[in-house]
Image (tube, rainbow, N blue to C red):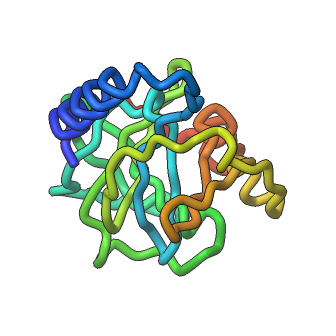
Amino acid sequence: MSARDIENELRERATRLSRSAGNKQQISTEAFVAFLIGKQCFGVPLRAVVYAGRLRHLTPIPNGPPHLLGITLMAGHLISVLDIASLFALRRAGVADVNSCLIIESGPRKIGLAAEQALGIEEIPQDQISEISLAASAASVRRAAFVERMHILLLDPQVLLADPRLLGGGSHG
């Protein structure tokens, strides 16, 4: 899903929301970009996504940790690509099924999140988001949601990019 696709989808949703603005009961929602990796669905806040697109070329990092798949150039950003499933020990690292990347940022740091499939933007009602507690290795996942028969682990980009396992693995330019 490209940045233009995300922008178009946001416009369409804004139009639908403005049409339903006549409703007296407003439902508070939070927008996430949902993606699949390691048979798990993750969501990252839309406000943290800089770019989303196909992963066309990936250069391995010599002697790099298994959760850093390599570096790539996307939309003018030279970026490290993180396999979140490997970081959280959900599966062994591998790039055969990874074909998309979401570039996220928090403050000055950026990183690419590898994705097997970008699912699009999910407007998740606040009452469907729950606080959760996972293992220390997954500290950047503090919330989850169940939306349309899909369980989504919601990433906190600020906590993720401060993970000591990623030191030196953020933005390269």
- Residue 145, position in %: x, y? 63, 55
Q: Is residue 112 left or right of residue 97?
A: right
- Residue 159, compared with residue 136, is above or below; it is above
| Displayed quadrant of residue 29 | top right
- Residue 64, position in %: x, y? 50, 59
Q: Is residue 150 left or right of residue 17?
A: right
Residue at 43% across, 53% down: 34
Q: Is residue 52 left or right of residue 70?
A: left
Residue at 56% across, 69% down: 86
- Residue 90, position in %: x, y? 60, 75
Q: Nearer the viewer, residue 52 or 82?
A: 52
Could you tell me how many numbered marks the image carries?
0
Residue at 67% across, 50% down: 165
Q: Is residue 66 visible?
A: no
- Residue 137, compared with residue 49, is above or below; it is below
The quadrant the C terminus occupies is top left
| Displayed quadrant of residue 50 | top left
Residue at 58% across, 41% down: 125
Q: Is residue 28 visible?
A: yes
- Residue 57, position in %: x, y? 18, 56
| Displayed quadrant of residue 114 | bottom left
- Residue 157, compared with residue 131, is above or below; it is above
Q: Nearer the viewer, residue 78 or 156?
A: 156
